Amino acid sequence: MSTPSNGETGGRRPQRADARSNRERILKVAEEVFGKGGRSASTEEVARLADVGIATVFRHFPTKGALLEAVLVQRFDRLRAQAEALLHDTDPGEAFFGFFSHLVADATGKIAITEALLEAGGDSGGDAAQASDGLRRAVGGLLQRAQRAGAVRDDVQLPEVYALLVATSRASAHAQFEEGVRDRMLTIVFDGLAPLGY
């Protein structure tokens, strides 16, 4: 039995690896571009900075909306993984409050990408919504651990805590608070969530 030449199976594997590499690079660049530029950012800019042709971008993501949805899914999945890793932290209170702060600081880029997705006619209720739900559940896990540790008052539940998270995130992103103002705002929120004497 003859060994396949490089022009047969040998030539295909590197192409698949290249395709995966291109896709990962496109997503990474798109997250940066749309996270900063929002609705005004373009797929052409993504292609240029990712050092690929625009046809390569659309081969992986047929529409701008599909690209933005994939970016959001990646972002939510990354944040969920970070939250899940904190479920093993030895200080549940610090894990919860620290991750809450991280999400607020991360909100500007996420909101810009979401608004660009809606502008592009993408589906914010598809895979991105499922990934967002996964993040919400992970935050719920952090909240429960913090409550069991006595770091968060036990008369609050995830819906109101997540509403606070969304509200502070949107306020920080749209008002473009200075870091000191954002930190003081979070201190007030966290004082309200903490049991007396914590």
Image (cartoon, rainbow, N blue to C red):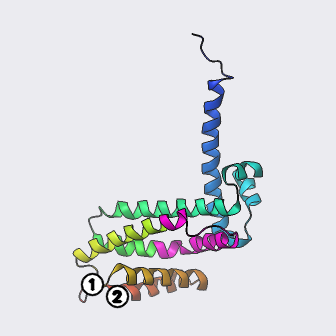
Q: Which residue is pictured at 27% across the width and 84% down the height?
A: 153
Q: Main secondary structure of the magenta part?
A: helix
Q: Position of residue 111 (x, y in %)?
A: 59, 74
Residue 7 is left or right of residue 98, and the answer is: right
Q: Nearer the viewer, residue 160 or 129?
A: 129
Left/right of residue 168 with respect to residue 60 in the rendered view:
left
Could you tell me the amino acid type at mark 2? Asp
Dot 1 lies on which element? loop
Residue 130 location in percent, x, y? 48, 65
Residue 53 is at least partly visible in this image: no
Name above or below for residue 151 compared with residue 11: below
Instruction: Pinpoint residue 108: horizontal percent, then vertical percent.
Output: 58, 75
The part of the chain drawn in magenta is 103-130
Crowd tier of the residue under label 1, counting other residues whose Cα lies within 10 Å: few below 14, some 14–19, many 20 or above? some
Q: Is residue 37 above or below residue 162?
A: above
Is 20 part of what is drawn in magenta? no
Residue 105 falls inside the magenta stretch: yes
Rendered image: mark on residue 191: 2
Observer-nearest of 156 and 108: 156
Residue underneath mark 1:
153
- Residue 93, picture quadrant: bottom left
Residue 179 higher or lower than 66, as above or below: below
| Nearer to us in this view, 24 or 194 | 24
Q: Residue at x 64, y 30 (%)?
A: 12
Residue type, mark 1 in image:
Arg
Residue 142: image tag? none
Task: Tell whether 84 sits left or right of 133.
Answer: left
Query: Dot 2: few (<14), some (14–19), or many (≥20) neighbours within 10 Å?
Result: few
Can residue 151 be seen in this snapshot? yes
Going by the image, does 181 lie left or right of 153?
Answer: right
